[in-house]
Image (cartoon, rainbow, N blue to C red):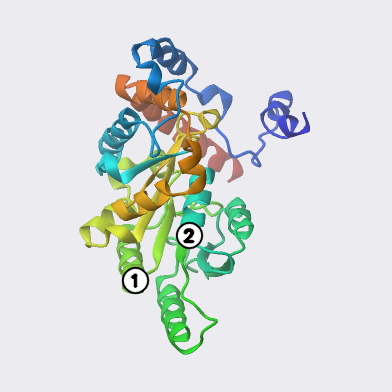
Amino acid sequence: STLALATWERAEQAPGILNLAIGQPASSLLPLTATQSAANGLSSYDPRHLLQYGSISGSSHYLTAVASFLGGQLAHEPSPNSLFATPGNSGGLSLVTRTLTSPGDRILIEDPSYFLAHQIFRDHSLDLIPLAQRSDGRGTLDMDLLKKVLWRSRYLSTTTADNPMPKFLYCVPTGNNPTGRTMGDADRARLVELCAEYNVRIVADDVYELLQYGQADAPRPLREHAASLGADATVVSLGSWSKVLGPGLRLGWVEADADMVSRLAADGEVDSGSLTSPLVESLVTSMLVSGDAARHLDALRQSLSKRAEMLASSIQ
């Protein structure tokens, strides 16, 4: 089909061309052997966890495995009860957006930011307020600008009926798309403090959080900053296996406070049949529990780091 030829098939047909328009892993970096091994072991699961309708928030074995995996990788282990299964980051972002907003609401979005997220927000008829990134190239959001925007928004919301406060701030704190910048710990703490003060949630697109090369120097996740500052409800984090294991799995998670998780579960589409596949959840769980996912991620980081260095060297 035209759609297929526009993505991976087209790239395969022209091996001499590096197509930077495709945001997906190289075929050589996909964990095919680990996936096959996990599939072979699915018979050990209760059939109700494979081919029946799944739990509203996701299978308990999947959420428990994700929590443990994140704790081992990020030194921030969330409670399984704070996780909610999604069909990847795009599906998770859409779910969170329609849960937190109504048509006509305003949201803050870093500028530049992930361009396809813009369409999701416009599909929900939202008004996007851009926030310029730091001019010095260090980090992402300009926190002084953010404080001014939040102060002005609160002032106008109390004096003018048609100027409500923004419902949330959307950002990609690690590996911003398209700048590649990562927000440092000091800015992350200040971001949480400001948004908590003005009662504006942060929707953090953390799709690249697990792919950071220098893990020893990696900044702490925004959710961890929020917890340490007593502002757990301020940050909603979106995670996905698309860039780690493979986009064809169509599986991810949201990490949020208990009230937010309950609100996600009350969504009409979720209540009708949940958003994810228990079969795929069990497949990924097998890779997490066996250690195959962790071993693949370690090799993936090394490969991506080497490729990045080669690309930068070639350009220079």
Question: Which image quadrant for residue 12?
Answer: top right
Horizontal side, residue 187 vs residue 141: left or right:
left
Which x, y percent locates residue 287? 37, 22
At x 45% / y 34%, what residue is drawn? 241
Q: Position of residue 189 (x, y in %)?
A: 30, 63
Amino acid at circle 1: Leu
Which residue in the structure is indicated by mark 1?
194
User: Mark 2: few, some, or many residues within 10 Å (few <14, many ≥20)?
Assistant: many
Q: Residue furthest right?
A: 2
Q: What residue is at 33 percent from the left and 34 percent from the top?
A: 63
Q: Position of residue 3 (x, y in %)?
A: 73, 34
Q: Position of residue 159 (x, y in %)?
A: 46, 89
- The residue that appears at 39% across and 68% down in the rendered structure is 200
Residue on which disc 2 sits: 170
Find the residue positioned furthest to the bottom. 159
Q: CA distance from mark 2 to mark 1?
A: 14 Å
Query: To which quarter of the image does residue 259 belong?
Result: bottom left
Residue 154 in view, yes or no: yes
Q: Which secondary structure, mark 2?
A: strand
Above/below status of 260 relative to 211: below
**199 over 225 or under it: above or below:** below
Task: Identify which residue is drawn at 53% across, 36% down.
Answer: 310
How many marks the image carries: the answer is 2
Q: Viewer-proximal residue, 226 or 258?
A: 258
